[in-house]
Image (cartoon, rainbow, N blue to C red):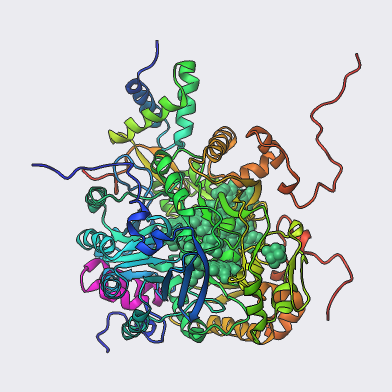
């Protein structure tokens, strides 16, 4: 019986196999591009050759059924050529301009909208949450869905002052550049893990558990004569690392878990340097399935930004210009002691000048 | 006389078994221990080969607890069969 | 309506944005695992709490990366998701596919898993979401037979990823796809067999727009840039000037961070010596302005999350490097850094933290780079210098 050969270390298929012939011919020879309309790009090569791109939305979590549908559409309209973007959008790569509108129509019939180009809100980068992670303080897919539903007009249009990039991470581990987005939603635990002293010794290795804590808050101890651990609660910053190593230290807590909202980060080097997001709202309780308080806050930030920012100003650049006091004024978000950094380099964020706006 | 890679893998296995339940070892910790033990007779590349041998023979498995470690196979969900 | 097993989640099928709940239901038509996921997720929505347990002990034979173990903590209620492991499949550079290639992948996945996927995971991999331990070897064997391999996870080289680059972007200053493929193939052993103190991420961006967020997300960030003058097509500048909706002074010149542009209503001038290559003017006038011809990349190192030392973006270690294959200079540098990390790194410490602990100055000395003013924003402003040498009287 010839078992199929199990091969290791072969790496991914070579990308050239998947490139459209026009892309292969003009690889590295693109001259300029234009956004023909929301979601549709044309790239023009030095030779005058053109390639069209139709950018479509995706929830990132896709069934094989939908992938196969996308394959059929690609076969029908783009010679089978397609790609995905760094923000999880689907891009069909077309050589025939006449196929653009029929493709868009058929996508729409299948509830797949087209957009996310230029000065829009593109797809939200996000993490796994309750779909697939043990560490999550909130769900990512649900938040993405409700925020995009609410901000949908900005995906289909390009009327904002600049791009607005939104990201959702479901716990402090923050798997996926959330801290550098225009608007970030971050799930937070707010209470140290509860310790199951009766079972800890059986379920966990105590030395590894102690070592897992980044703030050294965990110490070995004995409880009712059994070896266990204790947590110095003042040192715990609710990261959940210990739970990853020791299942007898669950950190999830429906009463206290929730989300925070951060604003003004960016990764591109255009104009201003890349920066982190800053805290706008320290805590909103989880309110599934539609997290209304979160979507309202996000919508508020986007709306005020759309009205107040200059063209080509990202959210952070806009706030920098008007000043943070004005940002809190305009949004009505409360400024609390949690907004003031108290970690290692906190001092760098204190105002050490009398230059101020009121 | 140089140490054979098989011998090195056996020695690594003994080390992992000795630390089981006490301390999680990374691949590089194990190689460093071997270099301490055998001195110039082994180098990092041979260490890596021995680890490969150890893993391919399924005497040890990689585990992930924040970082990656090498341990004896666990009961639940260890490599199939 | 009332017999729905997921009344709360059904709310998330409403609205214009494509629904992940609908996707789970579609997968559930083919796989009981997806149905199990739907039901467990409904419980999470009801209780506002995750029902997954950590599971870092599964993999395929010989590999230390590529599989993320996951177990349900409610397997008595949802036996179909008792195991629900993720398979990270190494994506093609630039996330390009053909329909046939995707069908091939789905063929394998429908046979062995939940029919659910992520296109893509945050690291860049093609993600198969949810399968049982007993299916892992079969999935791997079938993938490898068709020419696919697993990606990284754990303390290894994570699957390298890149922007669309020269395949479809006129701004690309080097071939991001080729470099990604080359590094992925060169470091197969490091990718599959974790040997580092912690994870190592490579990300390739073709220009300072950094569409893959490499500066924030990677230990080793390679960002394309150029050294000579921005190329200008004056005819095209006139077209922009003629466009009533476009204001060159306001949208371009005033927004230039180095204030090195001027516009007199007729002629656009750039003082290229003072340009910091931020991309803004090129982004907004792509028909008129182009990156220079002397192209290469800057290398930044050490982005990291932990808030310990204050989180960091990556910082410059090589201001400009040539990017023509076979990338020997780059690979020598990587080898030197890995050697340093092996010697000085401690468990679960990213290279950025290691450098912070040791000091950037010592780090570059040990990997054989020369200190350059481009590596810092300014020289130090405190006098506590740790001089390593002093003179002794004869
Ligand atoms: C809104 C709050 C924040 C969220 C949601 C967030 C989210 C994230 C995410 C998702 C990543 C991982 C990127 C990846 O590798 O895929 C990340 C990385 C990182 N974050 Fe944040 N972050 C937040 C706040 C901050 C803050 C306040 C800082 C620093 C002041 C920071 C610094 C970093 C750094 C340095 C990384 C390194 C990337 C890496 O290790 O690969 N983050 N963050
Ligand atoms: C608010 C406080 C803190 C937060 C939110 C925080 C967060 C984190 C996170 C999310 C990680 C995982 C990083 C990863 O896996 O890449 C981490 C790792 C770590 N943290 Fe912290 N941390 C904090 C404070 C500290 C402190 C005070 C220390 C030490 C004194 C510390 C030391 C470490 C170490 C050594 C790691 C492992 C290195 C690594 O995993 O990259 N952390 N921290
Ligand atoms: C102790 C710290 C951390 C733990 C325990 C942790 C744990 C995890 C887990 C369990 C997953 C898999 C989620 C799933 O599929 O179920 C994951 C995914 C991931 N993690 Fe982390 N993580 C940590 C820190 C980080 C940090 C600091 C980063 C980046 C800065 C990061 C980046 C990622 C990425 C990119 C993914 C893929 C996520 C996706 O595709 O949605 N992780 N992490
Ligand atoms: C007009 C100038 C620009 C062009 C032609 C351009 C081109 C592109 C291209 C080709 C992609 C797809 C990349 C991929 O998937 O790897 C992309 C995506 C992206 N770019 Fe740019 N870029 C431009 C400016 C910028 C700027 C200034 C930023 C950041 C401020 C930026 C951030 C991004 C992001 C976040 C994505 C992912 C978008 C999505 O998937 O919907 N880009 N851009
Ligand atoms: S951000 Fe936290 S909860 Fe979300 S996938 Fe990453 S580790 Fe899991
Ligand atoms: S949650 Fe994090 S900080 Fe708190 S005890 Fe656990 S490991 Fe330590
Ligand atoms: S990073 Fe630059 S080269 Fe790469 S896709 Fe974005 S704009 Fe183009
Ligand atoms: S690239 Fe940036 S710094 Fe250089 S001229 Fe253009 S706007 Fe100014």
Side (left or right) of C73 relative to C292 = left
Residue A252 visible in the shown view? no
Q: Measured from the top left, where is residue A311 in percent x and y? A: 67, 80
| Magenta region includes residue B48 | no
Tell me which residue sits at (51%, 41%) in the image.
C327
Q: Is residue C328 or residue C340 the one in the foreground?
A: C328
- Asked whether, in this view, residue A88 is left or right of residue C314, the answer is left
Q: Which of B5 and B30 is in front in this view?
A: B5
Q: Can you name the residue that lies furthest to the bottom here?
A: C1
Vertical relation: A239 (above or below) A213: below
Q: Which region shows up in magenta?
A: C20-46
Residue C221 x/y as whole percent: 56, 51
Q: Which residue lies furthest to the right in this view?
A: C393
Q: Quadrant of residue C54?
A: bottom left
Q: In which quarter of the image is ligand 1?
A: bottom right
Name the image quarter holding the N terminus of chain C: bottom left
- Picture coordinates of residue C196 (x, y %)? 49, 39
Principal secondary structure, stretch drawn in magenta: helix
Would you place residue B8 above or below residue C303 in this image?
Answer: above
Residue A123 visible in the picture: yes
Name the side, left or right, on which C310 lies relative to A358.
left
Q: Does the magenta stretch include residue C37?
A: yes
Quarter of the image containing the C terminus of chain C? top right
């Amino acid at each position: 019986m010839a078992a199929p050969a199990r091969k290791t270390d072969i790496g991914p298929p070579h990308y050239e196999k998947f490139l459209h012939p026009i892309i292969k011919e003009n690889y590295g020879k693109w001259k300029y591009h234009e956004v023909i309309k929301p979601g549709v790009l044309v790239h023009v090569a030095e030779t005058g050759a053109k390639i069209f791109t139709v950018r479509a939305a995706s929830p990132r979590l896709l069934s094989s059924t939908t992938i196969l549908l996308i394959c059929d559409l690609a076969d029908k309209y783009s010679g089978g050529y397609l790609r995905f973007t760094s923000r999880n959008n689907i891009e069909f790569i077309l050589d025939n301009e006449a196929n653009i509108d029929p493709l868009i129509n058929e996508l729409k019939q299948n509830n797949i909208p087209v957009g996310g180009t230029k000065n829009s809100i593109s797809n939200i980068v996000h993490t796994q949450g309750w779909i697939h992670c043990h560490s999550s303080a909130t769900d990512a897919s649900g938040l993405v869905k409700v925020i995009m539903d609410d901000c949908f007009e900005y995906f289909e249009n390009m009327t904002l002052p600049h791009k607005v990039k939104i990201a959702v991470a479901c716990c402090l581990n923050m798997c996926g550049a959330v801290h550098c987005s225009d608007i970030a939603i971050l799930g937070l635990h707010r209470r140290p893990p509860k310790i199951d002293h009766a079972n800890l010794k059986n379920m966990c290795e105590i030395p590894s558990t102690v070592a897992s804590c980044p703030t050294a808050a965990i110490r070995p101890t004995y409880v009712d004569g059994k070896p266990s651990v204790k947590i110095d609660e003042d040192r715990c910053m609710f990261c959940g690392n210990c739970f990853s190593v020791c299942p007898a230290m669950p950190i999830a807590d429906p009463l206290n878990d929730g989300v925070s909202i951060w604003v003004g980060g960016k990764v591109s080097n255009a104009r201003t340097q890349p920066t982190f997001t800053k805290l706008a709202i320290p805590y909103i309780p989880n309110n599934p399935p539609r997290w209304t308080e979160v979507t309202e806050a996000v919508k508020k930030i986007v709306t005020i930004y759309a009205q107040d920012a200059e063209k080509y100003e990202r959210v952070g650049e806009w706030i920098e210009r008007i000043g943070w006091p004005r940002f809190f004024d305009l949004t009505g978000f409360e400024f609390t002691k949690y907004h003031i950094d108290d970690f290692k380099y906190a001092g760098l964020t204190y105002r050490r000048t009398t230059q101020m706006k009121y | 006389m140089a140490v054979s890679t098989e011998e090195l893998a056996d020695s690594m296995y003994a080390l992992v078994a000795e630390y089981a339940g006490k301390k999680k070892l990374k691949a590089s910790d194990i190689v460093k221990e071997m270099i301490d033990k055998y001195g110039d007779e082994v180098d990092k590349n041979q260490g890596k080969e021995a680890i490969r041998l150890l893993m391919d023979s399924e005497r040890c498995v990689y585990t992930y607890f924040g970082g990656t470690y090498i341990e004896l196979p666990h009961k639940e969900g260890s490599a199939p069969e | 309506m009332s017999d729905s097993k997921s009344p709360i989640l059904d709310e998330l099928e409403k609205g214009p944005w494509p629904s992940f709940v609908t996707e789970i239901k579609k997968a559930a038509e083919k796989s009981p695992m997806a149905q199990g996921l739907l039901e467990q997720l409904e419980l999470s929505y009801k209780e506002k709490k995750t029902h997954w347990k950590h599971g870092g002990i599964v993999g395929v034979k010989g590999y230390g990366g590529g599989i993320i173990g996951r177990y349900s903590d409610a397997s008595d209620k949802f036996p179909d998701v008792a195991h629900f492991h993720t398979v990270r499949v190494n994506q093609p550079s630039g996330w390009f596919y053909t329909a046939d290639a995707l069908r091939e992948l789905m063929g394998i996945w429908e046979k062995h898993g939940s029919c659910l996927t992520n296109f893509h995971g945050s690291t860049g991999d093609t993600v198969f979401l949810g399968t049982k331990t007993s299916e892992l070897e079969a999935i791997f064997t079938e993938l490898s037979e068709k020419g696919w391999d697993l990606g990284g996870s754990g303390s290894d080289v994570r699957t390298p990823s890149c922007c669309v680059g020269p395949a479809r972007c006129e701004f690309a200053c080097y071939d991001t796809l080729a470099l990604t493929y080359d590094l992925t193939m060169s470091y197969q052993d490091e990718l599959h067999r974790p040997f580092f103190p912690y994870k190592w991420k490579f990300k390739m961006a073709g220009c300072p727009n950094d569409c893959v967020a490499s500066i924030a997300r990677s230990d080793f960030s390679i960002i394309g840039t150029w050294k000579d003058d921005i190329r200008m097509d004056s005819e095209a500048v006139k077209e922009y000037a003629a466009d009533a909706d476009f204001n060159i002074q306001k949208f371009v010149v005033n927004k230039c961070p180095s204030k090195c542009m001027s516009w007199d209503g007729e002629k656009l001038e750039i003082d290229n010596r003072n340009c910091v290559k931020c991309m803004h003017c090129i982004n907004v006038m792509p028909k008129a302005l182009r990156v220079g011809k002397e192209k290469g990349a800057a290398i930044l190192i050490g982005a990291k999350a932990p808030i310990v030392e204050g989180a960091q973006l990556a910082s410059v270690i090589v201001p400009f490097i040539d990017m023509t294959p076979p990338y020997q200079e780059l690979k020598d540098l990587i080898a030197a850094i890995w050697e340093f990390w092996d010697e000085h790194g401690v468990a679960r410490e990213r290279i950025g933290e290691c450098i912070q602990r040791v000091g950037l100055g010592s780090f570059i000395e040990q990997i054989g780079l020369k200190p350059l003013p481009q590596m810092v924003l300014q020289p130090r402003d405190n006098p506590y210098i740790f001089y390593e040498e002093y003179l002794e009287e004869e």
